[in-house]
Image (cartoon, grey):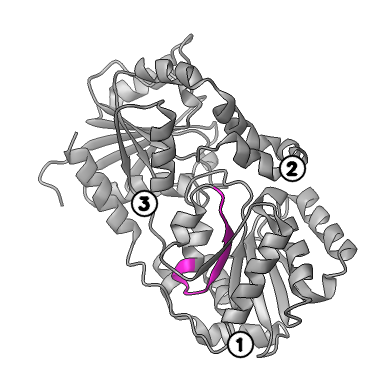
Amino acid sequence: MSEKQYSICLVTGNFTQHNRRLQPWRYLSEAACQLAALGHTVAIVTNGASPDFVPPLENVAIHRLATVSNPWWRPNMALQQTIQQLKPDVIFWHVGLTSFFHQQLSHSGAAPIVGILTSPIYHLSELSLIGTKKLISGFGLTFVHILGTLAPKWLLRHLARKNRQLQLLVAQTESTRQRLLSTGVWAKRVEVIKPGVDAIWSQDHTNAGSHLRTHLGYHSADKVVLYFGSPAPLRGLHTLIQAVQQAATAVPSLKLLILSRRHADELMQEDAQMRHLLVHTAVEKQVQVISGFLEPEDLATYLAAADIVALPFELVPSDAPLSLLEAKASGKPVVTSTAACLPELVADSPHYLAQPADVTSLANALIQAANDLEGNKFRPYPTGRTWQQMGSEWLHLIQTL
């Protein structure tokens, strides 16, 4: 425990029970919880009208406001008053590249502000690989990235300099840090504090996985590729289905197991599109689909039952997808794409890279991964990185302010 005890305020929007396990809120809430566990006073200020809207966090106070937006042209007095009442020693402010367009990252006190940048930064050529149709259909996810890519960097640079209390930015990956520096938007200090993973992902689930594999009807000779997450096209699932069909001509034993993560009331359209694609690509017999929201313990067992994990994101909406880190920690070889930070996340573990939204490139990666399974046992990758270690790094950063 640090000798000095700090009071810390985290400002972030849309922190809800629904998304608390998803990025970027998992990272943000873990930073808060880990600092609180070290004995510091931590409060989260977010938006929401109902007590049920925001999940309770141990030793972390949560303050709900109508909005946490603080536009240049209309200061958010409720937010300013809340921060003043909390009397923080340091403020963490959740930002994106486009935040500089409209957000006034300041307050009436003297506490320094640390911006937590959680969005990847793209080049226009990278977005063009995805295709206009997918960019438009996923406009809710792509809009902010398109805007950040097309925005005049001189204007962002000018607006960023107006935030004088903003001392530094923190990213989750070196890839995003380097992209930020290359834009010239931010000339001050930029640090990287990487996320951790839960211990469950590196635990041995071999026995449970073996039983589940048999229950699912797979044989020892089958090469089971696991996809888990949202069935949204930008996650790469539609491209993966077509790639499996293509790769199966070279590897007939290739099977695809899809864990379509969705609650009963969401993503019905994306799920229907996926099933339609399965029928019309004549690959349905090689694929199993399990829909629903799995608990981590169940998901870890499915990971143990598979041979390869395929998470070929075409666009990474939030930096450092935890699913990739979890798959890596489980010891499975990972097939992913070259989008954003993904190559960095898997660089020190068995992995295969494909071009985003490229069926043939992804099929070749799957074939290579399947062939490498022959006589080759991949060892679990000992990441050794926990959320507690991440919290310690955050504390060290605060001490340097």
Q: Where 48 falls versus 320 (above or below)?
A: above
Q: Secondary structure at mark 2?
A: helix
- Circle 2 crowding by C-alpha within 10 Å: few under 14, some 14–19, many from 20: some
Distance CA(mark 2)–CA(mark 3): 29 Å
The disc at residue 194 is 3
Task: Specify which label sits upstream in the sequence, 2 or 3.
Answer: 2
* Highlighted magenta segment, given as a residue range: 328-339
Q: Which residue is mark 2?
A: 134
In front: label 2 or label 3? 2
Residue 265, position as x, y percentages in the image: 73, 50
Task: Specify which label sits upstream in the sequence, 3 or 1.
Answer: 3
Q: Nearer the viewer, residue 246 or 30?
A: 246
Distance CA(mark 1)–CA(mark 2): 38 Å
Q: Amino acid under label 1?
A: His
The disc at residue 185 is none
Query: Marks 2 and 1: in contact by CB < 8 Å?
Result: no
Q: Is residue 212 left or right of residue 400?
A: right
Residue 379, position as x, y percentages in the image: 43, 80
In front: label 3 or label 1? 3
Q: Is residue 370 left or right of residue 78?
A: right
Q: Which residue is mark 1?
A: 211
- Tell me if residue 303 can be seen: yes
